[in-house]
Image (spheres, rainbow, N blue to C red):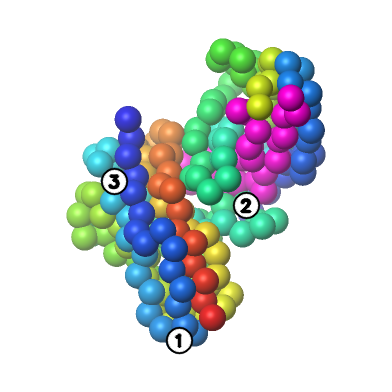
Amino acid sequence: QEKVQQSPESLIVPEGAMSSLNCTFSNSASQSIWWYQQHPGKGPEALISIFSNGNKKEGRLTVYLNRASLHVSLHIRDSQPSDSAVYLCAVSMDSNYQLIWGSGTKLIIKP
Amino acid sequence: EAAVTQSPRNKVAVTGGKVTLSCNQTNNHNNMYWYRQDTGHGLRLIHYSYGAGSTEKGDIPDGYKASRPSQENFSLILELATPSQTSVYFCASGGTGGDTQYFGPGTRLLVL
C-alpha cells in the first residue's frame, strides 16, 4: 500500500517569507503528485500537480519532484495571511488514478 | 467553475440508525468519490464511481454503501450507523484519468 507522509505537521512563517512544505511517497511508480489547499470548514481545492522529475512553477508556487528520492516539495513565495491553511499532498498510483493522501501540513502566516 | 454540493451539511444520528449523505455535481464528470477525513488520517477513500449505475469499493468500504443513480448524483449510505463513523465526509468529482478532483463543502456527521 502506497504511503504518503508530510512534514512538518505545522509551520509558522512570517508574512512575505518563503513557505516550504515536504512530502515523501513510497513508490517511484507513482503517477502524478498533487498539492491541495484546505481552509477551515471547506473542502480541499487543487493547487498544482507535477508528473515529471524537476520543477514546475505557477505564480507564487513552485513544486520540486525527485522520483529517485521519492520526495516532492511545495514552496510558496511571498507568503500571505490568506495562504494560511492545511496543505495536502496526494499521489496517484495506478491506472485508475486513485489518490493516496498525506495527513497534511498546517501553515500559519503571521502578519 | 466546477460545482459540487453536499447535503446535509451537519447531521446528528443515533447508533443503529440509517444515514444517507447526498452529493450533486454540475460538472458532468464521470468520476465521483466519497472520502472521510479524520484528524491524523488525512482523506480516506470509501467508495467511488465511474458513472451512472457503477460503484466501486475504496480503501475503507466496511459499514458503507454507495449509490450512483445518475451522472449528477452520488449517495453514501450508512445502514447501521456507529460512533466510529463520526467524521467529516467529503464528496468529490473528477474527469477521467488523472484530472483534478473538485470537492464539496463536506458533511459533519456525529453518531451518538
Q: Which mark is residue B25?
A: 3
The Cα–Cα distance between marks 3 and 1, rounded to whole angstroms, is: 29 Å
Rendered residue at 64%/40% (across/down):
A86
Amino acid under disc 3:
Gln
User: Is residue A104 found inside the magenta-colored segment of the image?
Assistant: yes
Q: Mark 2 or mark 1: which is in front?
A: 1
Using the image, determine if residue A36 lies above or below residue A78: below
Kindly indicate whether the residue at mark 1 contacts the one at mark 2 (C-beta within 8 angstroms): no
Residue A41: x and y in percent read: 53, 48
Name the chain under label 3.
B
Q: Is residue B96 left or right of residue A46?
A: left
Residue B69: image quadrant is: bottom left
Name the chain under label 1.
B
Residue A95: image quadrant is: top left
User: Is residue A95 found inside the magenta-colored segment of the image?
Assistant: yes
Residue B17: image quadrant is: bottom left
Q: Which mark is residue B42?
A: 2
- Pick out the residue farthest to the front: A111
Q: Earlier in the sequence, mark 2 or mark 3?
A: 3
**Label 3 neighbourhood size at 10 Å, few (<14), some (14-19), many (20+)?**
many
Q: Is residue A2 left or right of residue B62?
A: right
On the rendered image, what quadrant is the N terminus of chain B found in? top left
Q: Are marks 3 and 1 on the same chain?
A: yes
Q: Earlier in the sequence, mark 2 or mark 1?
A: 1
SS assignment at label 2 = strand
Amino acid under disc 1:
Gly
User: What stretch of residues is rendered in magenta?
Assistant: A82-111
Q: Are marks 2 and 3 on the same chain?
A: yes
Amino acid under disc 2:
Gly
